[in-house]
Structures are given as structure tokens and as C-alpha cells.
Image: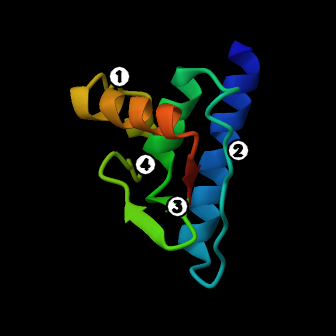
Amino acid sequence: MERDSARLLEYEWRLEKMFHQHPELSGICQYHSDTLPRSLLRQGLLVHPSVFINETLSLINPHYLYTEERANEPDQSDSLEAAVTRLCQSGDFTPV
């Protein structure tokens, strides 16, 4: 699982870099909060600039880190953990 998690995070960073290099492109990464470990949901929040809640609500993600190097820094902030908990409880987690 650890290896797969690292591969998923690397993939997400590569996509994020591509979207910055090509602003005409965009994407929506869909995560199932009921099947992924909290650590992956936490990483998902760190690597996406916004969160799609539903068809009418998309939020700027205050936990977004622009660089991959910063994602390797441990972020155990209470607000990040609270955000992961809310997303797990709601069942909706679509960072974009």
C-alpha cells in the first residue's frame, strides 16, 4: 500500500505540473473517501488547489501546496485534519 500511495502522489504531482504548464487543460480527480486511507485523503488535499463539493459548490483549498517539495514536509495542522474528517463524514471528496 505504501508503494501504491507514493505512486499515486507522484502521478498527482505530475498532473498538477502539467495543468500549470498548460492552463487550457483541467481535470477532476475523484477519490472515494470511504475506501482510501486518511493519509491519502490528506495528501489529496495538499496537492489540489480546489475541492469540488457538488454540482453547485467548488471551494478554494486552503491546504494546497504548490510544490512537491513542500508536500514532503509533515503538516499535522488541526485545520487539515478537521478538513479530512469533514470530507470522510460527508462522503464527498473531489479535489480539482
> What color scheme is it?
rainbow
Q: Quadrant of the C terminus?
A: bottom right
- The residue at 64%/47% (across/down) is 12
SS for callout 1:
loop
Q: Which residue is mark 2?
A: 11
Whether residues under marks 3 and 2 lie with C-beta atoms below 8 angstroms apart, the answer is no
**Nearest to the observer: residue 10 or residue 77:** 77
SS for callout 3:
strand
Look at label 4 and name its amino acid: Thr
- The residue at 23%/26% (across/down) is 78
Look at label 1 and name its amino acid: Pro
Whether residues under marks 4 and 3 lie with C-beta atoms below 8 angstroms apart, the answer is no
Q: CA distance from mark 4 to mark 1?
A: 14 Å
Look at label 2 and name its amino acid: Tyr
Horizontal placement of 39 versus 76: left or right?
Answer: right
Q: Which residue is mark 1?
A: 74
Residue sticking out furthest to the top:
2
Snapshot quadrant of residue 19: bottom right
- Ranked by sequence position, the earlier of labels 4 and 1 is 4
Look at label 3 and name its amino acid: Phe
SS for callout 2:
helix
As drawn, the label of residue 67 is 4
- The residue at 39%/63% (across/down) is 59
Q: CA distance from mark 3 to mark 1?
A: 24 Å
